[in-house]
């Protein structure tokens, strides 16, 4: 359940260039996406190399969706978006992961699909990332798991 070619499995420099770990959840890991074109954009990746939801047993599926729900809840609490978009693509990186993208009414791409990889990425300073991660970690402690 580990793929040496996959950056979610190896957690190599490619992963660290793209995201910052926020927390380990029950069956997944939550990351802050370094591109903050949509403020609060996160990624949640399953902790084992599985490529499709239907390969999970029902308990794993429940736990994963509960992790996704908790992650979305803390994004909502922390950044107060009008809606959160959930996206699983994986054509190029097949390891199961959701993009969790907060959307703000009247702002960029409201009412449309978000641009997965914008050419003008919003890259922040380390202190800003640290503050966002800290706020998300604090709010995570307020949420509950299913079991
Ligand atoms: Zn993987």
Image (cartoon, grey):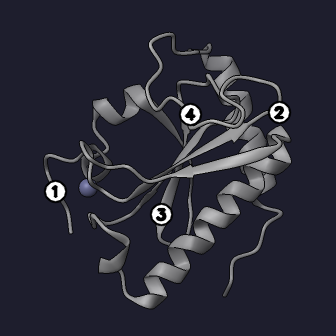
Residue 132: percent from left, percent from top:
72, 33
- The residue under label 2 is 105
- Looking at the rendered structure, the secondary structure element under dot 4 is loop
N-term-proximal mark, 2 vs 1: 1
Residue 38: percent from left, percent from top:
66, 28
Q: Nearer the viewer, mark 2 or mark 3?
A: 2
Q: Quadrant of residue 32?
A: top right
N-term-proximal mark, 1 vs 3: 1
Q: Residue furthest left?
A: 4
Residue 99: percent from left, percent from top:
51, 46
Q: Residue furthest front?
A: 111
Label 4 – label 2 distance at C-alpha: 13 Å
- The residue under label 1 is 3
- Looking at the rendered structure, the secondary structure element under dot 1 is loop
Disc 1 C-beta below 8 A from ligand 1: yes
Residue 18 in the image: above or below residue 120: below
- The residue under label 4 is 114
Relative to 79, 12 lies left or right? left
N-term-proximal mark, 1 vs 4: 1
Label 3 – label 4 distance at C-alpha: 23 Å
N-term-proximal mark, 2 vs 3: 3
Label 2 – label 1 distance at C-alpha: 39 Å
Q: Nearer the viewer, mark 1 or mark 4?
A: 4
Label 1 – label 4 distance at C-alpha: 29 Å
Q: Residue at x 54, y 82 (%)?
A: 62
In the image shown, does 109 or 135 lie closer to the viewer? 109
For disc 1, the neighbor class at 10 Å (few under 14, some 14 to 19, many from 20) is few
Q: Residue at x 62, y 13 (%)?
A: 125
N-term-proximal mark, 3 vs 4: 3
Residue 88: percent from left, percent from top:
43, 53
Label 2 – label 3 distance at C-alpha: 29 Å
- The residue under label 3 is 28
């Amino acid at each position: 359940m580990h793929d040496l070619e996959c950056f979610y499995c190896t957690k190599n420099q490619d992963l660290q260039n793209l995201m910052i770990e926020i927390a380990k959840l029950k069956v997944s890991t939550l990351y802050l996406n370094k591109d903050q074109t949509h403020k609060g954009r996160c990624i949640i990746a399953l902790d084992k190399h599985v490529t499709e939801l239907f390969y999970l047993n029902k308990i794993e599926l429940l736990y994963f969706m509960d992790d996704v729900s908790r992650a979305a809840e803390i994004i909502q609490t922390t950044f107060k978006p009008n809606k959160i978009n959930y996206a699983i693509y994986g054509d190029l990186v097949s390891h199961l992961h959701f993009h969790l993208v907060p959307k703000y009414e009247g702002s960029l791409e409201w009412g449309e699909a978000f641009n997965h990889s914008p050419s003008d990425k919003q890259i922040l300073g380390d202190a800003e990332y640290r503050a966002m991660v800290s706020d998300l970690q604090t709010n995570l402690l307020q949420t509950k798991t299913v079991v």
